[in-house]
Amino acid sequence: MLTIYGVYRSRATRNIWLADELGVPFKHVPVIQANRLANPNAPGAPLHTRSPEFLKINPNGHIPSIDDDGLVLHESLAINLYLAKKHGGPLAPATVAEDGQMSMWSVWAMTEVEPHAIQVLYHRVAKPVAERDPKVAEAAVATLRAPFAVLNQALAKSDYLVGNRFTVADISLAEVFRMASAAPELFDAAPNVKAWLARCQARPAYKQMMAKREAEPA
Ligand SMILES: N[C@@H](CCC(=O)N[C@@H](CS)C(=O)NCC(=O)O)C(=O)O
């Protein structure tokens, strides 16, 4: 049985969306970020990223993690590649070449895009207004123009990233690019990216995941 650790309001959405697309049943353990709790050490506090019980599963103290019949894995996008390859089908790489392409896009998204996209999210939306720094958001947007252009060019030839079909790479990248949603100027300058993200987010499994995310307290 697959267990996914991490609340819906976290990067766990990447793994939950994929599991739903694959039709893989899973147990969901809603570990919450410790920094979202006023007093994580209070008696009766929910299971969180610094709970000793969770640190035994992920000593990094981050969500998501999975336990798949005893195999414990961390890192959201590595988890996605593992689950896709384990369960196969159209979401998974069909050849070693596709495996290379899916790994390339995933590592690219995590290193070239996510660190900046998260600054857009923090400084335009997520932080309390008094803590937002528009200059940080602007700098992140400026840096993101180049990777947005790269993805825009890649998507000029195909509706999806790899193999001309919707795959795990699209799920992982769509979730990373969603972090930059508060910068519509980036999407307007990259119409293929904008249309691709809308295509990915029109999928029933995405909508199901997002409905559960919205139902969680902010
Ligand atoms: N590279 C990791 C990042 C994990 C991460 O930073 N997760 C956040 C939530 S989205 C977290 O656990 N924050 C709370 C904490 O670090 O205590 C991944 O993609 O899985």
Image (cartoon, rainbow, N blue to C red):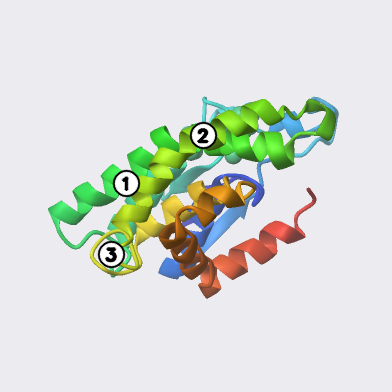
Return the residue at label 2. Answer: 142
Residue at figure coordinates x 57%, y 46% from the top left: 180
Residue 151 place in picture, x, y as percent = 36, 51
**Viewer-proximal residue, 192 or 92?**
192
Q: In the rendered view, would you say 162 is above or below 23?
A: above
Q: Residue at x 53, y 66 (%)?
A: 201
Tell me the CA gap for discs 3 and 2: 38 Å
At label 3, the amino acid type is Gly
Task: Specify the amino acid type for callout 1.
Answer: Trp
Q: Can you tell which quarter of the image residue 46 is in?
A: top right
Which of the two labelled residues, at mark 1 and mark 3, occupies the earlier sequence position? 3
Q: Is residue 51 visible?
A: no
Q: Which residue is mark 3?
A: 88
CA separation, marks 1 and 3?
Answer: 19 Å
Q: Residue at x 54, y 39 (%)?
A: 117
Q: Is residue 50 above or below residue 1?
A: above
In this figure, which residue is indicated by the disc labeled 1? Answer: 105
- In primary-sequence order, the first of circles 2 and 1 is 1
**Which quadrant of the figure has residue 129?**
top right
Q: Earlier in the sequence, mark 3 or mark 2?
A: 3
Asked if the residue at label 3 sits under 8 Å from ligand 1, the reply is no
Image label count: 3
